[in-house]
Amino acid sequence: MTTNPGRFAKPEVRAVSAYHLEPRDTPIKLNQNENAEGFPHALKEEIWQRVAGRDWARYPDFHLREITQRLAAHADVPEDWVLVGNGSNELLQMTLLTVVGRGDHIIVPLPTFTLYRLQSVVMGAMAHTPLMRAETNFAFPVDEVIDLAQRHDARAIVMCSPNNPTGTAYAEADIRRVIEATPGLVLLDEAYREFNRQDLCHLVRDYDNVVIFRTFSKALAMAGVRVGYCIARPEMAAEIGKVKLPYALNILSEAVTLVSLDHPELFAPTIDTAIQQRDRLLIELPRLPGLTVYPSAANFVLVHVAQGSDRAFQRLLSDGILVRDVSHYPGLSDHLRLSVGTAAENDALLESLSHFTRHPG
């Protein structure tokens, strides 16, 4: 008898597609918005020594006291406002799990990071998805978001600034309007904030319906280590803490984070370089025929390819360059997201795209 064990999954799970990334091995990898300059080698020996001195047979500190204290000082907030997790994605999921249930309404403006909507739908929520449009450089639809949130008594509104994959940074005044006018909890993802010199932590001090999420994966070159944290009023942080899995960090990820916090001077130059290289791409890419380039405050650039994003993607791939084809996102037909690489990688990207745009056949 043929059976399908997948039938045991709840309908909300069966109805969605998994978050997917096809594995490809290329010399130049510009598809995941990583820090192309890499983690400072000078710090690795200190990290190894810290980890080697720990007893690996013992669990990490249950309360993660040292790293929580350091992150609170880093964000200039009290310790009980901070929760540490296995990447900011885990904390976003835990917050949604804390706040959103079956039949609740949530606002997720699109296009944005697909996991926001995916996680909400899996939890049984109704996701309302107002569209940000290319003709406005993907400006945040403040009035539409407020209207939807009020009309449906939304439990949560998710915002990402700078937004992935558009690169758009939202004006603080617009974010405040949403916070003040909507009934639900505002989840503000600041994964790319360092590339915009933006710090919205004061919004948590000003309002009690905000949670801010941050990561060490992007600007701080720790995507492989998986560390993130969120900042919330202590009453909300305590509720999220009930849902969050214990022992969120292993001793290696904790050590890498603590050492990195000791040496901000080693990361500042790599962030400066990423910003300089992004601005270079924003100047040089529009010179290529058939490319429409949008403003970006992140470490990636979104482009529309008149000759077809699939053709451009394949040409780049044949030249050993992997980028992200985001043409399946709502409103992004024939768009590519290009992560900022090193100067040499960006040279290769521009050369390949230049050849393609002039000889697309």
Image (cartoon, grey):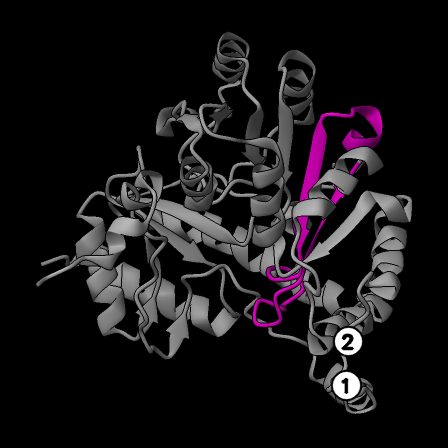
Local secondary structure at mark 2: helix
User: Residue at the spot x=46%, y=38% of the render?
Assistant: 123
Vertical arrangement, residue 109 with respect to residue 325, above or below: above
Q: Position of residue 110 (x, y in %)?
A: 41, 32
Looking at the rendered structure, the kind of residue marked 2 is: Ala
**In the image as oriented, which residue stretches furthest toward the front?**
1
| Quadrant of image for the C terminus | bottom left
Looking at the rendered structure, the kind of residue marked 1 is: Val
Residue sitting nearer the eye, 13 or 302: 13
Q: Spatial distance from mark 1 to mark 2, Cα to Cα?
A: 7 Å
Vertical arrangement, residue 70 with respect to residue 173, above or below: below
**Drawn side of residue 361 relative to residue 166, left or right:** left
User: Residue at the spot x=42%, y=64% of the render?
Assistant: 30
Q: Position of residue 329 (x, y in %)?
A: 31, 40
Specify whether residue 209 is painted magenta: yes
Instruction: Please report the bounds of the magenta region as a residue range.
Output: 203-232
Q: Position of residue 357 (x, y in %)?
A: 22, 54
Which residue is denoted by mark 2 in the rendering? Answer: 255
Which residue is denoted by mark 1 in the rendering? Answer: 51
Q: Are marks 1 and 2 in contact (CB under 8 Å)?
A: yes
Q: Position of residue 57 (x, y in %)?
A: 73, 86
Residue sitting nearer the eye, 153 or 1: 1
Q: Which label number is shown at residue 293? A: none
| Quadrant of image for the N terminus | bottom left
